[in-house]
C-alpha cells in the first residue's frame, strides 16, 4: 500500500509552462498520500509549489544535494552536501580548457552564479523565477551544491557528459542529464534516491510504502530506491523500463489521476 509519493517536478508534476493546474493542486491537497517534491531545481525555485500544494515536506533539491522543508514560509535545510572547492575548480578548469564555449554556472544553498547573461540564462531565470548573481568568481563564493551546464545541442551534450564522466568518474562526481539540455554535476553519491534514504533513516518510513515518479535520467536513482517506481508516459525510455507502472503524462494530470485512486 502506497503511503508516500516522491515526485519529480518539470515534465512530471508541472505542466509544460512550469505551473501547476487546479486539479493537481486540489487532488494533492486532499490526498491521504503524503507528497514530497524532488528536483534538480534549487529550493528557492521550489518554495512556491510547496506553498501552493500545502506540503509539509521534506523535499529534495538540486538532485539530492539539499533536503529541506518549508516552515512559516522559510526554507529550513535538513541536509546539505557540497562539491569541495578544489574539485569544483578542477571541473571549471577542465571545461575552460576543453569546452570554452560552454558557460560554467554553479548553485550554492543560497545563490545561482553565472558568468554572463545569455538567452539561455534569461530563459532559465524567467522559468524558475530565480535571479542569478553575475560575474562572481568561484573562489569567492560558498562551495557549490550543484554545477549546471546548459547545452541545448544533444550531440554536444552527450560529448561533454561522456568527457566529464571519463575525467572524474562516479567516485568523484555524479554527472547526469536533468532534461531540456541541462547537465547537472553533484557531489559523489548524491542523487534523488537520497530522499528515500532520508525518509527511511530519519522518519522510519518503510521503502515498501514509498512510490516515486519521474521522466528523465536524473530520476533513475529515485525509481531504483522506492518500493513502487512509476514513470509518466512522456518519460524517456530508460525511465519507462525501470518503472512498474506507466501513468498519464504531465499534460494529462498524471499525478492527480494516480492519486485519485487512493481517495475512495
Image: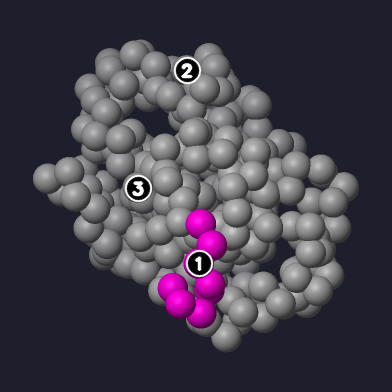
187 relative to 165 in the view: left or right: left
Sooner in the amino-acid sequence: mark 1 or mark 2: 1
Residue 137 falls within the magenta-colored stretch: yes
Q: Which residue is found at the position 54% from the left and 62% from the top? A: 135
Please name whichever residue, 70 or 232, is drawn nearer the observer in this view of the structure: 70
12 relative to 68 in the view: left or right: right
Please name whichever residue, 126 or 191, is drawn nearer the observer in this view of the structure: 126
Residue 200 falls within the magenta-colored stretch: no
Mark number for residue 47? none
Quick one: SS at disc 2?
loop
The reply to whether the C-beta atoms of the residues labelled 3 and 1 are less than 8 Å apart is no
Quick one: SS at disc 3?
helix
Q: Position of residue 55 (x, y in %)?
A: 24, 38
The residue identified by callout 1 is 136
Vertical placement of 19 versus 170: above or below?
above
Circle 2 or circle 3, nearest the eye: 3
Mark number for residue 253? 2
Sooner in the amino-acid sequence: mark 2 or mark 3: 3
Instruction: Point out the stretch of residues depicted in magenta.
Output: 134-141
Q: Position of residue 18 (x, y in %)?
A: 48, 27
Please name whichever residue, 108 or 72, is drawn nearer the observer in this view of the structure: 108
Q: Residues within 10 Å of mark 3 (few under 14, many from 20)?
A: some
Quadrant that contains the N terminus: top left
Q: Which residue is found at the position 33% from the left and 34% from the top? A: 49
Spatial CA span between label 2 and label 3: 24 Å
The residue identified by callout 3 is 44
Sooner in the amino-acid sequence: mark 3 or mark 1: 3
Amino acid at each position: 500500500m502506497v503511503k508516500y509519493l516522491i515526485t519529480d517536478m518539470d515534465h512530471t508534476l508541472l505542466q509544460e509552462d512550469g505551473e501547476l493546474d487546479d486539479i493537481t493542486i486540489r487532488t494533492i491537497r486532499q490526498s491521504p498520500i503524503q507528497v514530497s517534491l524532488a528536483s534538480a531545481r534549487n529550493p528557492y525555485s521550489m518554495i512556491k509549489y510547496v506553498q501552493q500544494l500545502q506540503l509539509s515536506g521534506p523535499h529534495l533539491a538540486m538532485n539530492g544535494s539539499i533536503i529541506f522543508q518549508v516552515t512559516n514560509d522559510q526554507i529550513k535545510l535538513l541536509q546539505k552536501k557540497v562539491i569541495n572547492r578544489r574539485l569544483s575548480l578542477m571541473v571549471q578548469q577542465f571545461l575552460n580548457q576543453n569546452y570554452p564555449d560552454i558557460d560554467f554556472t554553479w548553485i550554492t544553498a543560497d545563490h545561482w552564479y553565472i558568468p554572463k547573461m545569455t538567452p539561455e540564462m534569461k530563459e532559465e531565470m524567467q522559468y524558475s523565477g530565480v535571479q542569478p548573481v553575475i560575474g562572481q568568481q568561484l573562489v569567492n563564493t560558498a562551495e557549490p551544491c550543484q554545477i549546471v551546464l546548459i547545452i541545448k545541442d544533444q550531440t554536444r551534450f552527450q560529448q561533454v557528459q561522456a568527457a566529464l564522466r571519463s575525467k572524474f568518474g562516479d567516485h568523484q562526481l555524479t554527472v547526469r542529464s536533468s532534461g531540456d539540455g541541462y547537465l547537472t554535476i553533484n557531489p559523489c553519491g548524491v542523487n534523488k534516491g537520497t530522499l528515500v534514504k532520508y525518509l527511511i533513516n530519519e522518519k522510519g518510513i518503510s521503502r515498501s510504502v514509498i512510490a516515486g515518479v519521474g521522466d528523465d535520467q536524473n530520476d533513475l536513482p529515485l525509481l531504483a530506491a522506492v518500493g513502487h517506481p512509476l514513470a509518466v508516459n512522456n518519460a524517456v525510455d530508460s525511465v519507462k523500463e525501470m518503472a512498474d507502472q506507466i501513468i498519464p503524462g504531465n499534460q494529462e494530470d498524471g499525478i492527480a489521476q494516480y492519486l485519485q485512486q487512493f481517495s475512495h
